[in-house]
Image (tube, rainbow, N blue to C red):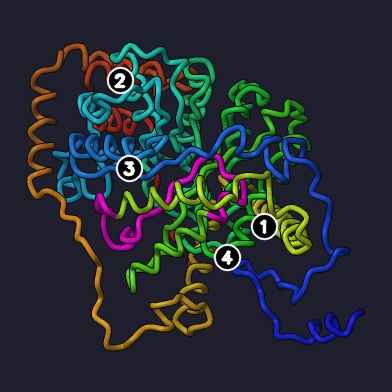
Amino acid sequence: MSAQLKAAAGAARVTTPSGIDVPVVATRDMASDPGAPGVYPFTRGIFADGYRGRPWTIRQYSGFGSAEASNQRYRFLLEQGQTGLSVALDLPTQCGYDPDDPMARPEVGKVGVSLFSLSEMETLFEGIDLGAISTSFTINGTAAIVYAMYLAVADKQGVPRAKLTGTIQNDILKEYVARGTWIFPVRPSLRLIADSVLFANSETPRFNAISIAGAHVRDAGCTAVEEMAYTLANGLAYVDELIRRGGDVAKFARRLSFFFYVHMDLFEEACKFRAGRRLWAKLLRERYGVTDEKALHFRFGVVCGGSSLVAAQPYNNIVRVAIENLAAVLGGAQSIFTCAYDEAFQIPTEFSAELALRTQQIVQHESGVAATVDPLAGSYYVEWLTDRMEDGMREVMGEIGAYGGVVKAIEDGWLQRRIALRAREKKDATDRGERVVVGMNRYRREDEAQSFGEVFRLDPGTAARVLEKHAEVKRTRDAARAARALDTLEAAAAGEKENLMPLLVDCCHAYCTVGEMVARLKRCWGEFQEPVRL
């Protein structure tokens, strides 16, 4: 051992945010061979030519107030070079309430666009060709309904369903443990997800009917290793359910996609994706015998931001998002959206949204980072850390399996408790100053006055106008047709064999509302009750 390595061996201990001990210096004997890009197990990426053949899709998560206001923002972002839409929906839409419900009124249009029926979806995409744009929806409890609405809009636009591209999140398992916009109990929710995935395989073969999401468990407090492990465990639960329903894993796995947050440790985040991509391919081959290479592809989108952004000294978030964007590209993401610097405390303004978009465009066109496939490959540290991340993911997944699987862990509250404890550890470390957040718990001037820049203000008349439109839809629609569609949906939901997606599309074409469809399904399935565990 050289004198330098001997000296390094005695240096202070440093760990990644996931608790992995970081070597002071990585050496050749620590690194494994990552193989070639585009070749199983895809450590270096699922495409042999990386971003040269297809740049990542640039999305910006957007939606607020009314469908009209959100449509204007979408048009602006598309004019500025955005290449895909990412739709944010308000809490009433996410939780299955119509805007006139007392539970919904205070939240109409506040954290996303209100979409109570097909009429609003038509307005949202007015002037936007659904056959030419990829659309992502961050929606879970009512995902099948929103997907059905999107199909109904395409039908009315005359766009063949086979041309539709995009993703609907539709991952209910992580809602139970992290985000909270669940509606139905676990098992009927899995049925609804399986219905939508199997339906999409035949009706919209280019559309991803599920995006298995680690993003929200990460923002709830998990480490990068846990985020990936929980997500892959959820993914296996969906695969098992789809197989139980008669699905062909070699077929439906081609349209499974994933969704994550990127936080601030650049190397751990990039290695998280390299390890997760490799592990997913191995799991599908080992557990299910999948050999079709496209079915083994780990396709994922990311958000650069989330809880890693803070309100203190908000312009620092611009730097954070740029670093996270770089990590996402180095990890091989297929779709990226960058949070605006003010998203820690408000809906982005047009200015901040454009700046976040420009961040991606600068990384894509000026940085040179996408010119070659997996530019970090061959780094002793990166290959070593990728291996350690995979080991950690397997260990966490083994603990979930030993408990009885994710469904049991969720129904018992075991997984929720693990995440809550991890969140407490993270907060305590931040409060003690062990986890440094620049401008918030270190390097903050006591006398500084906060400057948040331009303030976004939601039109105070939005909710009233949405309520007026809701009443108008119910007054002018064919009431008998809507009632028949709802009755047929409820009858099918009471059984277990019929795929509900065609019936949901029929309901949307009849201008049934989200609240009406959810109410009929609740009659059959009830609601999820949060387990309480000490």
Q: Label 2 crowding class (10 Å Cα cut-off): few <14, some 14-19, many 20+?
A: many
Q: Amino acid at mark 4?
A: Asp
Can the viewer see residue 413 in this picture? Answer: no
Q: Is residue 215 magenta?
A: no
Point 59% across, 62% down: residue: 266
Q: Give the spatial CA distance, label 2 vs label 4.
A: 41 Å
Q: Cβ–Cβ below 8 Å for labels 1 and 3?
A: no
Point 33% across, 22% down: residue: 129
Q: Which residue is mark 2?
A: 153
Does dot 3 land on a helix, a strand or a loop?
Answer: loop
Res 88 label = 3
The mark that comes first in sequence, 2 or 1, is: 2
- In percent of width and height, residue 170 lies at 45, 36
Q: Which residue is mark 1?
A: 396
Q: Quadrant of residue 297?
A: top right
Left or right of residue 52, residue 32 in this image: right
Res 356 label = none
Q: Amino acid at mark 2?
A: Val
Left or right of residue 472, residue 16 in this image: right
Q: Give the spatial CA distance, label 3 vs label 2.
A: 17 Å
Q: Give the spatial CA distance, label 2 vs label 1.
A: 42 Å
